[in-house]
Structure formats: C-alpha cells, structure tokens
Amino acid sequence: MAGFVVGTIPVVIVRTVSGAFRAVVGRCPHQGGPLHLGLLTGTTLPSAPGEYVYGRESEIIRCPWHGFEYDSVTGRCLGDPERMRVRTLEVVARDGDVLVDL
Amino acid sequence: MRIIDADVHESFASVKDLVGYLEEPWKDIVARGAWRGFTQPFAYTTPGAGNRADVKTADGTASVADYGQMRRQLLDLYPITHAVLTGYFYPAMMKMQFEFASALAAAYNDWMIDHWLVKDERFLGSVHVAPQNPAAAAREIDRIGPHPRMVQVLLPIATLAYGEPFYHPIFEAAERHGLVIALHHTTMAEGALGMGRYYIERHMLLPQAMMAEVISLMCNGVFDRYPSLRFVLLEGGWTWLPHLMWRMDREYKALRQEVPWLKQLPSRHVVERIRVSTQPTEDIDARQWEKIADLIGTDDLFVFSTDYPHFDFDSPEAALPVGLSETAKRKILWENAARLYGLS
C-alpha cells in the first residue's frame, strides 16, 4: 500500500496478494483520516455467532484512525455500504509502471 | 476558530520512567520489573492497537509518549489554545496494594509535570490519585493541586462508585483547591452486566459506566455537599443526558424522602454543575444536535475534545456536524471549556 498526492487529491494504491493493483481516493469520508497510513488487510466474513471466517486477504483498506474498512474493489465501507464509500480509481499496470486514472 | 481540547492523553514509554520519582520500597519494585504496569483485559481490534495507527515516528515505532509527535499531529496542526492532559496511567485500577497505588499516582504527577506540563504553555494538567485510599488522595491533591497549571482531579472509572461517602475527602480536597472533577473510563470499566464478551460490546457499554457514576454522585449528595465543585464527563457520550435528567427527576419527585441530602431536582445539578466532552461524536446531523441540546435545555454543557492519540480521535475539522451555528461552535470549541477552567 502506498500513498501519493496528486494536486490536492490523495491517492492510495494497493497491491493485493494475487498481484492486482487497485487505487482509491485516500481520504476517509468519515473524519478525513489518511488511508495510506492505515492497514491493507483482510476481514472477518459474515458468519454464525462465535465463528470466525477470515477472508479477502489484502483487499480491505482500514483507516488508521477509527478503523473503518473499505473494500478496495467497490470502495464501499463494510460497516455502512449504502451510505459510505471512497472513490475507486482505474489502475493499469504496464511495462513496470502503475498508471492511475484520476 | 480557537479550540480548547478537553481530553488529550499523554503517556510514558514505560512504567520504569517513574523509577526516579518513586521512593522505596516502591522504587525497587518498579526498577526490578516486579510490577509491569497495567494491561488491558482484552485485545484491541483497531489498526493502531488502541491508538491512531498514524501516531508513529519516522522509524515506524509507536510514539504516544512523544511530545514532538503530539505537537505535529495535534497542537500545531489545529488552532488549539489549551490542551487538558488526562493521562492513561490510572492507579485507580489497582485492586490491592493501595499504598503502592498512592505512591504511583504521586510519582506520575511529578513525572508528568516534568515531562509534559512544563514543555508547552498550552498544556493544563490533571491531578492523578489513588481513590482506593481517599485520605492519601486528599493529601496528594493538597500537594499537587496548587500547581498553577493543574485544573482538575481525575477520577478514573473502573468499578468504584465515587458517590459513596468513603470517597468524599477527595471532593473536599478538590473543592478546597478550586479544581474540577474529571471522570474518564479506564480499561477496567464495566457496563451493567459486566464487560461483555467483545471489545466492541465493551466500547458500547462505556456510557453506562458514566451514567452510573452520575447517579452515584447524585444520590449520595456530592453535588449538594460540595456546592462549588464542577464536573466534566470525558468520553462517556452525552446524547443520553435528556433521558437521565428526566429519569432522575421523575424518581426524585417520588422517592426523594430516602435521600434528603439531595436538595434539588437532579436535572438542575446536571445543568449547573456538569459539563460533557463531545468525543466520540455520534453520527448525528446539526439539526439533531440542536434538538438534543434543546431537550437538555442549554448548549452550555458541551466541551470539545479529540482524545488524541487514541483510535477514536475526533478531528477538530470533521467531528462537529456541518451546519451548527457559529455561536454553537464557538461555545463547544472554546467558550464552555474556558468558563469551566477559568481561562481567558
């Protein structure tokens, strides 16, 4: 996971364990936490009480402040997917460069 | 718009930092590592293990004990005129060895003054005590309370009900020195049915502990017996205040005969004597905020706080709902706390 600022737009680029690159706007819509300083992680999948099923390794971006989780594929906040999301950005990996479309 | 931050947590790097401030037999105990300090009875599930994950020095080590980092991320970043230091090392959590607890509280106060309070004029301090021994706590308040930058006595919420007459010497001493009483939960705080099974559950339960303390203080006559004492409830929420005020008043009208030392409607004590910190702000909009303030009857009660460096930090730029009036924001961010602590 790496953070860049393009103009005034913070951009977070992540590389998942499968080698895919993904990018989102790196400011948490909750209180503005800097997402590039958070965690690239997996998450606990929906399960029965007392049962933990861990999955989606390296696909979830977690804010360093309050721990809100964002799906790097959809940008949606796992805790409030209908109302909260970060903007996802197109990424292309080409000739050793990673290009992000703002 | 200027800000007073009512809840900022300074820390030491290790409990051994207190060695030079302890006398024997406690000094040797801490120096030898015979007591390792407090640990929370749960695992943090947040990215920064209880703290903001971006509170780190350049080499990646966590730096909640670093004044420079606090300056960069809080004091110099926002227009903060005063930051009230509230600590996070609370000897009130000890379940035994209360003489040791009292010695630790005193050592912490001296260490905190040397390593934090004197470093920045914006800092105001909390007197830490071991309430398990109220006489020693009162002596500590008499010793440290007169320090010109000390503004309050911190009563950490674990499982002690501070209204009980046993603790009254602490309030007497605080009143003697014109200090505010601040209440803040510890990692040992519990809800009505205990801690719960999960960290999230415990975090949801924290306001219950705060409400229980208010009820304890109220029914044991602390507000009446110490009429010039003011109280600030830190990090325990506030949107529950209308309910608690109505509930206490209702019970008072019916049952006050049992507690004749409680001499006026509890809601009046709340409005006159209690202030509440805003963090952690709940997801309410400006209209809902104003509605709840209206139910309380005043917006004089709210004091802004960030809780830096903890994970549930409230950003001064984003925590208050958009659309609050400029007057309300001024009161929340500065004026209410300035009045509470006598700042100008």
Image (cartoon, rainbow, N blue to C red):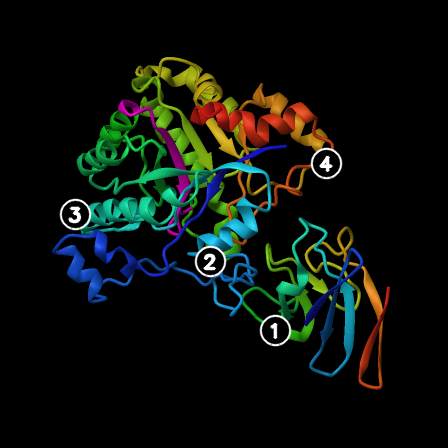
Mark 4 and 1 residues: CB-CB less than 8 Å, in contact? Answer: no
> Residue type at mark 4?
Val
Question: In the structure shown, which secondary structural element does the residue marked by tag 3 occupy?
Answer: helix
Asked whether B297 or B315 is in front, the reply is B315
Q: Which residues are magenta?
A: B175-190
Q: Mark 2 vs mark 4: tell me if same chain.
A: yes
Looking at the rendered structure, which numbered label has been put on residue B237? none
How much space separates mark 4 and mark 1, taking CA atoms? 38 Å
Work out whether mark 2 precedes mark 3 in sequence or the reverse, and give the earlier one. Answer: 3
In the rendered image, residue B38 lying in the magenta stretch gets the answer: no
Mark 2 secondary-structure assignment: loop
Is disc 2 in the same subunit as disc 1?
no
Q: How much space separates mark 2 and mark 4, taking CA atoms?
A: 35 Å
Q: Nearer the viewer, residue A57 or B118?
A: B118
Residue bearing the label numbered 3: B99
Give how far across and how far down residue A36 sits, in percent: 67, 64
Q: How many marks?
A: 4
Q: Position of residue B151 (x, y in %)?
A: 37, 32
- Mark nearest the camera among 3 and 1 is 3
Kindly indicate whether the residue at mark 4 contacts the one at mark 2 (C-beta within 8 angstroms).
no
Q: Of label 3 and label 4, which has the lower sequence position?
A: 3
Tell me, for residue A53, which label it has, or none.
1
